[in-house]
Amino acid sequence: MSTFAVPSRDELLLRVSEIAPVLRSHAAWSAENRRLHEEAVEALTGAGLFRMRIPLRYGGYEADARTMVDVVTEVARADGSAGWVLASSLIAGWGLGLFPDEVQDEVFADPDGRVCATIGPGTATAVPVPGGILVNGSWPFISGALSSQWQQSAAIFLDPAGQPYPVMAPVPVAELEIVDDWHTSGLRGTGSVTTTAKDLFIPQERVLPAPAVLGSQSASKLNADIPMYRAPFIVVGAATTVGVCVGMALAVQDAFFERLPGRKIAYTEYPSQSEAPVTHLRVAEAAMKIDEARFHAQRLAELVDAKCASGDGWEMTERARSRADEGAAARLTLEAAQILAGSSGGSSAYTKVPLQRIVSDLQTFNLHAMMNPDVNAETYGRVLCGLEPNTYYI
């Protein structure tokens, strides 16, 4: 067991405040080049943020959900793409803690190593070979792949003796091919490229059934009593990423008020935009929506931390509400951003103005299948009505 001092939530937030100028200064470059700037990656790594959801014995922090939400929020406030890559890596690192201890020893040999992940098989299939499986296929949307050492991968195992079923396994990114296809309108800096496996051999000890991983059925002996593993995979994912949209909404709010002094409303007699009642109404409405989004984010984090501390089982309504909380936060933050963007005038359309980039990032966040507000609300509503959730990802 490691004896180093685990940084407190306040210490981690202080570190974020120290690196925020670096992240912010490279945000436009990252968007233009469709990947995080290397100095941004180094800043996140140097601050120890990728360690937050790694077991203590590897130099990790085993941070709780509240800490994750707060830290990811402030990182995303500086740069949404950096916040998304961090959150994605935290989910991947946590998920690898469900694998056998020997596998973790290999993956976490470098405590500052970075991992990326997918929970879907993409086009990847696996066939049995002596000592393991052979994988062929591709995975889209691999956020952070360009700066990661390992990828948590999924594939459909073609069992010659039975029905095909999904499996998951970590693989070194160096053994995959990178397809430079991340040409998008938002979250461009995440570098969420496609990765491809061609006759990739994966040792059997690294392979687990996907339902076991997604169901948080740990194959680790040493992690069995660690509180942060007492939550469903999808709930953990929601608690990890919800801070991204909250942080981006706060960034839009920051950008709006930075531009407000001295601005006028064109073709009106108002000497200052800040004196116009329409401005007062809009900024108040946006602020309240951001406050509501923060409520959902904090409620989600508090639920995860309370259940992990008590070890109590998870009700289906709690799991479904977790997705609904993230969906609500996604919707509210996008609405807030659109209100402020709509009050920013034609000059805000210039690419040099951060507002347009951040709003596009929030729009892209809302398009993600696991964050989509309507899909998540429907899932919660089905469960409240006594129906099955209609998805395995819960």
Image (cartoon, rainbow, N blue to C red):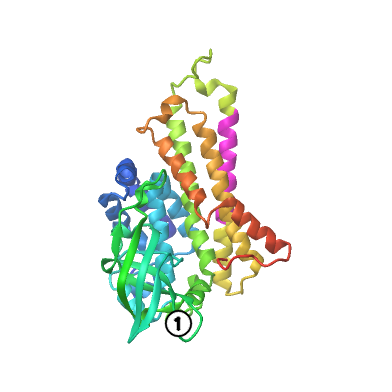
- Horizontal and vertical percent position of residue 330: 54, 49
- Horizontal and vertical percent position of residue 256: 46, 32
Q: Which residue is at 46% across, 38% downward?
A: 252
The answer to which quarter of the image holds residue 197 is bottom left
Quadrant showing the C terminus: bottom right
- Horizontal and vertical percent position of residue 335: 56, 40
Q: Main secondary structure of the magenta part?
A: helix
Quadrant showing the N terminus: bottom left
- Horizontal and vertical percent position of residue 356: 43, 36
Looking at the image, which is closer to me, 95 or 2? 95
Q: Which residue is at 51% across, 28% downward?
A: 343
**Left or right, residue 186 beside residue 312:** left
**Observer able to see residue 360:** yes
Amino acid type indicated by mark 1: Asp
Q: Identify the magenta region.
A: 281-298
**Left or right, residue 268 beside residue 154:** right
The answer to which quarter of the image holds residue 59 is bottom left
Kind of element beneath mark 1: loop
Single out the residue that lies furthest toward the right: 385
The answer to whether 33 is drawn above or below residue 87 in the figure is above
How many residues crowd around disc 1 within 10 Å: few (fewer than 14), some, or many (20 or more)?
Answer: few
Q: Which residue is mark 1?
A: 159
The answer to whether 56 is drawn above or below residue 141 in the figure is below
